Amino acid sequence: MLPSGTLSTTTTNNDDKRLPEISLFSPPFPKRHYPLVDELAHTNVPGCEHEKRYQDVELILVAGIDVFSTVNIQHLESLNDLVARITGVVVRERIPDRLLEQADEVVVVDVTPETLEERLRDGKTYAPEKIRSIAATLLSAP
């Protein structure tokens, strides 16, 4: 049985990096717990069962296990054109809107631009080498 609050992961090698991904072939997560699966729109590394993390979560849901997850609003398929028009960035990692439509509950959490800038500066959101270009694009006024 897995420890409370965790899903089993497998480590996959990709470009000389060891990356953790959800292991769908591990013992099942106890049904009395709700796993948190971060970054629902994440693209799994090559060699995983599914291309996208949301597809892993769909399989967990089919098994009768409820899941908490996180996703940034720009990753919703229906908002892709709007996000691109406002930011000039085409988001590649997207999830189908049906995932939100099927959810029992959706909680929107937002932070101020200042908090986001602070998180960027502190390296809490992206790798340091990406921060300058992301900040210039995503934090600019339309």
Image: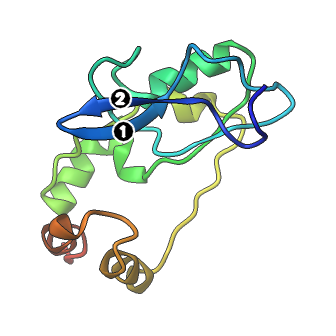
Residue 103 in the image, given as x and y percentages of width and height: 65, 33
Residue drawn 64% across the image and 54% down it: 107
Q: Secondary structure at mark 1?
A: strand
Circle 2/circle 1 CB separation < 8 Å: yes
Left or right, 127 with respect to 70, comes to left
- Give the residue pinned by disc 2: 12
Residue shown at 73% from the left, 29% from the top: 66
Q: Residue at x 64, y 46 (%)?
A: 106
Q: Nearer the viewer, residue 96 or 16?
A: 16
Q: Considering only vertical position in the picture, is 59 above or below 93?
A: above
Which of the numbered marks, if any, corresponds to residue 141? none
Asked whether 97 or 55 is in front, the reply is 55
Q: Amino acid at mark 2?
A: Thr
**The N terminus, quarter of image:** top right
**In this rendering, does residue 97 appear at all?**
no
Residue in front for this viewpoint, 27 or 39: 27
Q: Nearer the viewer, residue 125 or 76?
A: 125
